[in-house]
Image (cartoon, rainbow, N blue to C red):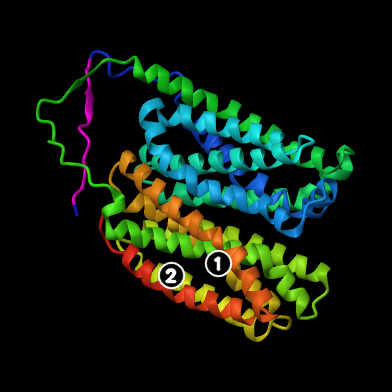
Amino acid sequence: MSVTRAVQPVLDPKVGTRTAKFAHPALLLAGIVLVALNMRACLAAVSPMVAEIQHTFGLSAAASGLITTVPVLFQGVGAPLTPRLTRRFGTERVVLGAVLALGAGVLLRVLPSVATLYLGCVVIGVAIAVLNVSMPGLVKREFPHRAAMMTGVYSTTMLVGATMAAALSVPLEHALGGGWQASLGAWSVLALVAGLAWLPQVLKARQEATVPVRVAPAAVPQRPAVSPWKSPLAWQISAFMGISSLLVYTLVAWMPTILADHGMPRGEAGLVFAFSNLVQVVGAFLVPLAAGRMTRQRGLALAMAGLNAAGIAWLLLAPVSGAWASATVLGLAQGGSLGLGLAFIVLRTDSVLGAARLGGMSQAVGYLVAAAGPVGGGALHQLTGGWDATLVVMLALSAVAAVAGWGAGRDRTV
């Protein structure tokens, strides 16, 4: 495969020793963590509030489902646009704009209108898409020798944010006394805090842009860029991410219902689901760390697909008696698949621009595929009157993810 290598500028010795005022690594790490906390929190916060939103606006069940489906769809739509934005405005400014747009979308979503409810969902989806694509390239650039470890840090932080939001939504509603609007609107404050924490990186980038550079005389000639959309490896990575995400979102939508329909009390079903989300944090942190120590990640990809299949099979054969075991296995598989998919973006490219392009493609394909999961799972349930058909299809898709992951784990670059 063709590999594009950018010409690297070399600082003039007379001016190249200048250090950016805002370049402290602790500020960068704090900014990454705070941005990552926002990337799932505003989505997870909605789940406990859906019934109240439905009652407020008189929405049907299908219309209420769009509150979670629309952001996922627009993550797929917005992802391919991000590489152009980062090339034109710089990654730092794009991340700042996206996190502030995310906060604005959160506020739009709580205005007293159905139109602004869905418009806010659109803005949130596009903003998350931009962050999803920007962050792997930024991590690759700023932590070239620890990219896999930092991928684990921010993917873990994303899941911590989601868990925190799901757990705090109802207590926030009671504490603030403003109903679901106050509870969901409060998450805009977290976006504002993240924007303020990220501001030093924008100032650092502006300062570095004023430092004169000269190009080394023996510059490496550039090869023609190859679009990731024409790369079989990029399609394998996209398929692995897409199917893994579909499995996640299908279970996010239906796992508590599946357990309840088989006789488990709804309160316990909610606890099982929350526990599964908590276990995802472990997989999201450990799997990218392991991936970074390997030249090939085929075994990891097969392990994640196998764990997904095992957890789904357990849910199919023993939905109540095996619920906690299934939740544990699925949590490890889902968190690990997320971390491995993001690690593929970093490990299968050799430049920041390449990571942005691959991230744009893989996440566009991934989220468009994932959006079909909750709808398809519900349709199969309605058609057959049970959940067995849905789970069997998910088992088959786990096998497809294993095949895609086997290809994505090769020691190649896009």
Q: How many marks?
A: 2
Whether the magenta-drawn stretch holds residue 7 is answered as yes
On the image, the x and y values in percent for residue 374 come to: 62, 64
Quadrant, the N terminus = bottom left
Q: Is residue 234 left or right of residue 318?
A: left
For the point 61% across and 43% down, the residue is: 37
Which quadrant of the figure has residue 391? bottom right
Q: Which residue is mark 1?
A: 247
Residue type highlighted by circle 1: Leu
Position above or below: 83 against 340: above
Q: Which sits in the foreground, 75 or 33?
A: 75
Assess whether residue 312 is covered by the magenta stretch.
Answer: no
Identified by mark 2, the residue type is Ala
Residue at (57% x, 51% y) in the render? 72
96 or 13: nearer the viewer = 96
**Secondary structure mostly taken by the magenta-highlighted segment of the chain:** loop
Q: Residues within 10 Å of mark 1 (few under 14, many from 20)?
A: many
Residue at the spot x=70%, y=32% of the render?
189
Circle 1 SS class: helix
Q: Is residue 288 visible?
A: no
Q: Is residue 211 left or right of residue 179?
A: left
The percent position of residue 145, horizontal first and vertical second, equals 35, 45
Q: Is residue 270 above or below residue 197?
A: below
Residue topped by disc 2: 401
Question: Is the residue under label 2 in contact with that under label 1 (CB below 8 Å)?
Answer: yes
Using a 10 Å C-alpha cutoff, classify the residue at mark 2 as few (fewer than 14 neighbours), some (14 to 19) or many (20 or more). Answer: many
Locate residue 180 relative to residue 21 in the image: left or right: right
- Magenta stretch? 2-13
